[in-house]
């Protein structure tokens, strides 16, 4: 059984929904940035920063894609998107009552990106997955739940 990290799009994130194509576009932007960094350094940095090919699988049905390693130190990372229910308590005006409010619990949907390490993944895959998760969470100003259970908040929070 592998491990999973999630990037949750919360209130304050740059967007509230995300598609698989948008995640691919963000990873392609990451590749582009590392390529430019490599050009400035005169070194093939992109090959080391992103040692994967992006593969869409027919069985994924548009829910996930595979990052397949290009060398033996990196094997596989699975990236998918989805939604999860969460509850929120809100106050709203009571019907027919002047100025009175009522507290109501609502169930809403929250979008997330799941980054999964299959059993065949290496320590290198886990390190790269952490790096990609941090990049995606920072770019989207999201809440990152790491493989070890810790949470990193990149979203603006009320102080």
Image (cartoon, rainbow, N blue to C red):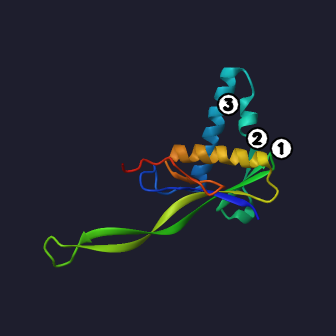
Rate crowding at label 1 as few (under 14), some (14 to 19) or many (20 or more) other CA atoms within 10 Å.
few
C-alpha separation, residue under disc 1 versus residue under disc 2? 9 Å
Rate crowding at label 2 as few (under 14), some (14 to 19) or many (20 or more) other CA atoms within 10 Å.
some
Rate crowding at label 3 as few (under 14), some (14 to 19) or many (20 or more) other CA atoms within 10 Å.
some
What residue appears at the point 41 percent right and 50 percent down from the top-left corner? 157
Q: Name the spot of residue 72 as percent of width and height, x first.
A: 86, 44
Q: Name the spot of residue 49 as percent of width and height, x first.
A: 71, 36
What residue appears at the point 79 percent right and 53 percent down from the top-left corner? 121
C-alpha separation, residue under disc 2 versus residue under disc 3? 12 Å
The numbered disc on residue 51 is 2
Q: Nearer the viewer, residue 63 or 134?
A: 134
Query: Relative to residue 157, is residue 6 drawn left or right?
Result: right
Q: Nearer the viewer, mark 1 or mark 2?
A: 1
Q: Earlier in the sequence, mark 1 or mark 2?
A: 2
Q: Are marks 1 and 2 in contact (CB under 8 Å)?
A: yes
C-alpha separation, residue under disc 3 versus residue under disc 1? 20 Å
Q: Earlier in the sequence, mark 3 or mark 1?
A: 3
Residue behind mark 1? 73
- Using the rendered view, name the quadrant where residue 51 is placed: top right
Residue behind mark 3? 35
Disc count in the image?
3
Q: Earlier in the sequence, mark 2 or mark 3?
A: 3
Query: Relative to residue 126, is residue 37 drawn left or right?
Result: left
């Amino acid at each position: 059984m592998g491990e999973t990290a999630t990037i949750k799009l919360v209130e304050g994130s740059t967007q509230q929904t995300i598609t698989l194509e948008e995640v691919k576009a963000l990873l392609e932007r990451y590749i582009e940035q590392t390529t430019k960094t490599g050009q400035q350094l005169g070194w093939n940095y992109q090959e080391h920063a992103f040692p994967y090919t992006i593969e869409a699988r027919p069985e994924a049905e548009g829910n996930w894609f595979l990052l397949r390693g290009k060398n033996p130190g990196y094997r596989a990372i699975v990236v998918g998107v989805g939604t999860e229910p969460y509850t929120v308590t809100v106050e709203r005006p009571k019907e027919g009552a002047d100025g009175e409010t009522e507290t109501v619990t609502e169930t809403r949907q929250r979008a997330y990106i799941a980054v999964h390490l299959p059993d065949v993944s290496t320590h290198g895959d886990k390190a790269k997955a952490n790096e990609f998760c941090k990049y995606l969470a920072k770019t989207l100003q999201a809440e990152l739940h790491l493989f070890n259970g810790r949470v990193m908040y990149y979203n603006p929070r009320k102080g």
